[in-house]
Image (cartoon, rainbow, N blue to C red):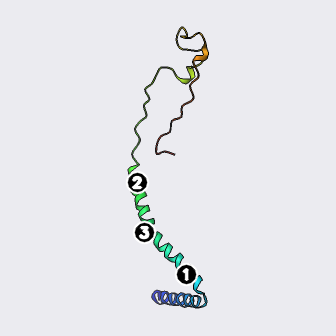
Amino acid sequence: MIKGLSWSVSVFFGVLALGVVVRLGGEALAVIMGVLLGVMAIIPFGLILLAATKSNSRTQERSAPPVVILGGGISPGEYHRNSFPYQYQPWSEPDYLPMPPEREFHIVGEN
């Protein structure tokens, strides 16, 4: 039953396609063939890309090591003119010690 139904559906769409092809001009057929061949050409590259991203996602499941920053003892919040952490200021003019810009950290590979 299912085999006969599938044959009849295939024959119906084959006759329908043949009727469309007979009525279309050469340029329209060229466009249709170009689209079909383009889609067929993309399929292998899509499968390769899918396989590559699948294997790449497995390697990135590792947890990233912790980020340890070893640096000076002055945090950007303590770096103001009037709250210099030493007992005296080495310069008489406080403008010689500008406020450092805020630092932004970007972890490579994360969004």
| Classed neighbour count for the residue bearing mark 2: other residues with Cα under 10 Å, few (<14), some (14–19), many (≥20) | few
Q: Quadrant of residue 52?
A: bottom left
Residue 11 spot, x, y in % from top left: 51, 90
For the residues labelled 2 and 1, the Cα–Cα distance comes to: 39 Å
Whether residue 6 can be seen here? yes
Front-most of 27 and 73? 27
> Could you say whether the residue bearing mark 3 is in a helix, strand or loop?
helix
Q: Is residue 28 above or below residue 71?
A: below
Image vertical order of residue 91 relative to residue 52, above or below = above
Q: Nearer the viewer, residue 67 or 101?
A: 101
* Inter-mark Cα distance, 3 to 2: 18 Å
Residue shown at the point (53%, 77%) measured from the top left: 34
Residue name at image x 52 percent, y 23 percent:
75
Lower sequence index among marks 2 and 1:
1
Residue 30's tag is 1
Query: Residue 44 shows which numbered tag?
Result: 3
Q: Amino acid at mark 2?
A: Asn
Please identify, in this view, whether the residue under mark 3 or under mark 1 is nearer the observer: 1
Tag 2 secondary structure: helix
Residue 95's image quarter? top right
Pointer 2 residue: 56
Callout 1: 10 Å neighbours few (<14), some, many (20+)? few
Q: Nearer the viewer, mark 2 or mark 1?
A: 1
Residue 49 falls left or right of residue 18: left
Q: Position of residue 45 (x, y in %)?
A: 44, 66
User: Please, is residue 18 above or below residue 32 in the view?
Assistant: below
Determine whether 29 is above or below 76 in the image. below
